[in-house]
Image (tube, helix red, strand yellow):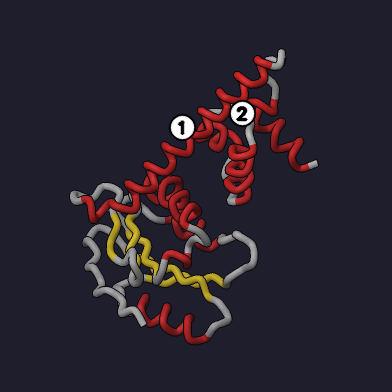
Amino acid sequence: MTVPTAPVPAPSNAIRVGYARVSTRAQDHLLQMEALEAADCRQIVEETASTRKDRPKLQATVASMRPGDTLVIYKPDRVARSVKELLVFLEDELAPRGINLHILTGICAGLHRPGGQTVADKMLFMVAAMAAEMERDLIRERTLDGLAAAAAHGRKGGRPAMVNPDALAIARSRRARGESVTAIAKHLGIGRSTLYRALEADSR
């Protein structure tokens, strides 16, 4: 069993909030709660695990936090089901709000700060920003390739070239988490009306 890292003292002007995603496995729940209770959290928010990606309590918790506050979790899988989902969470939810992430156990254990002074402090946020930039560049490149292919076959513009399967998959995932179409379109570099049409056609 991996031993949790020692708690990092919270700044006097900030708070530490623990988040636990509770499953039916009693042993896992106990380890998670004991670690959070020892991590100097002002409060611990518990959310029951779901087969869906909905985490309303997590979203409400992050929305209530201020710059400099720290979200404390036992392991990354408490807030994300994949590395990609974790990076999106860091880039879209925590970094813009200036919220730190403290992971108590596992390979990523430690305090990660988007505005930290050392690479170790902000490592996960740097990876998240780099992944988001690469994602946008790849989508843009595929869109241009699609336009070029369409032009070669005598077509101009249109939804198939503008919203490729990768962009559409990302848009569906972000919209399922409650993000607005306007914000998604801006992130992907796609026109809002174009993305609206693509999502509507995809839902039929």
- Secondary structure found at label 1: helix
Against 172, is 54 above or below?
Answer: below
Q: Quadrant of residue 144?
A: top right
On residue 152, the disc is: none
Q: Quick check: 40 left or right of 33?
A: left
Give x and y (percent) for residue 146: 62, 25
Q: Residue at x 29, y 52 (%)?
A: 123
| Tag 1: amino acid | Asp
Residue designated by label 2: 192
Q: Nearer the viewer, mark 2 or mark 1?
A: 1
Locate the C terminus and report the quarter of the image it occupies: top right
On residue 137, the disc is: 1
Q: Dot 2: within a 10 Å radius of its alpha carbon, few (fewer than 14), some, or many (20 or more) residues?
A: some
Q: Residue at x 24, y 64 (%)?
A: 10
Q: Residue at x 54, y 83 (%)?
A: 25
Residue at the outermost front position = 152
- Of residues 86 and 99, the one drawn nearer to the viewer in this rendering: 86
